[in-house]
Amino acid sequence: MQNDKIFDAHIHLNDDYKYQDINIKQVLNEAYQNHVGAWLCASYDLTSSKKAIELSEEFDDVYAAVAIHPNNVSSYDDLVFEQLDQLAKHKKVISIGETGLDYFYSRKNIAKQKDFFKKHIQLAIKHNKVLQIHIRDEKNLYSAYDDVIEIIKGLDHVAKVVVHCFSANEEYAKKFLDLGCYINIGGAVTFQNAKTLQHAVKAIPLDRLLLETDAPYLTPHPFRGQINFPKFIYLTALKVAELKGISVEQVIKQTTLNAKKLFIID
């Protein structure tokens, strides 16, 4: 893909709820016309993992990630990793994700979340895929971030890691950077109340940043509250450029170069 086009490093074109009646080809064509060049379709269960691969086969510029989202671990046993292992062999699968820890809704299944997270890490290492980490906690708490960092530090060998939809503060950004992680920035950075995140983005080196939509969720301002579409990622790029005091062209070029280097794509 061209360096003047955005690589959307995390999107759910395989979403079976909000995108159920959406013409994906039309949506991608609109994005092409708004500075977007390629997409990484992240997954949240076995069905969406298979769908992500199907979409990657249908569209040249769509790549796939396979995984079980932490909120869905209760629906599976360890046998699911045999299926994920087979899916990860597909040539268009460039990432394992999204996986991680989510304490926002419940802390009842933390042990299983951690177990599945570790198994996803091993899967990423085995197949030399980039790990896409989802981290979410209760408001103003960071225990999920601490637990993820502890797990990563405790491994002898860590896969290449991207922190999906980073929403913590500068302190945690630096902790992940020190571990060699890349950081995905999504539409939340455009929100008027996202001062902590905006401050963190200023401190993250441009050569460690990626852009994402997380569409159909987390729609950037001024369309917040509506369904998110791939074309809106340009608004996120504009905000990052504003925060860093550089041109949006610089943001697009460097984040795309980062993605091509990390995911080993042309």
Image: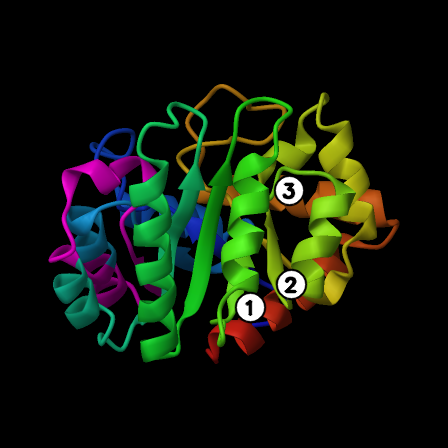
Mark 1 or mark 3: which comes first in sequence? 3
Alpha carbon separation for disc pair 3 and 2: 12 Å
What residue is pinned by disc 2?
255
Q: Where are the magenta residues, as a range? A: 53-80
- Residue 165 visible in the picture: no
Residue 259, which numbered label? 1
Q: For this view, does 152 lie left or right of residue 55?
A: right
What residue is pinned by disc 3?
236
Alpha carbon separation for disc pair 2 and 1: 6 Å
Front-lying residue, 65 or 153: 153
Which amino acid is tagged 1?
Ala
Q: Residue at x 26, y 46 (%)?
A: 14
Q: Residue at x 44, y 46 (%)?
A: 30
Question: Does residue 14 lie above or below 103 as drawn?
Answer: below
Residue 114 picture location, percent across and down: 37, 48
Residue 199 picture location, percent across and down: 81, 39
As helix, strand or loop, the secondary structure at mark 1 comes to: helix
Residue 42 picture location, percent across and down: 35, 52
As helix, strand or loop, the secondary structure at mark 2 comes to: helix
Query: Residue 257's image quarter?
Result: bottom right
Callouts 1 and 3 close, C-beta under 8 Å:
no
Q: Residues within 10 Å of mark 2 (few under 14, many from 20)?
A: many
Which amino acid is tagged 3?
Thr
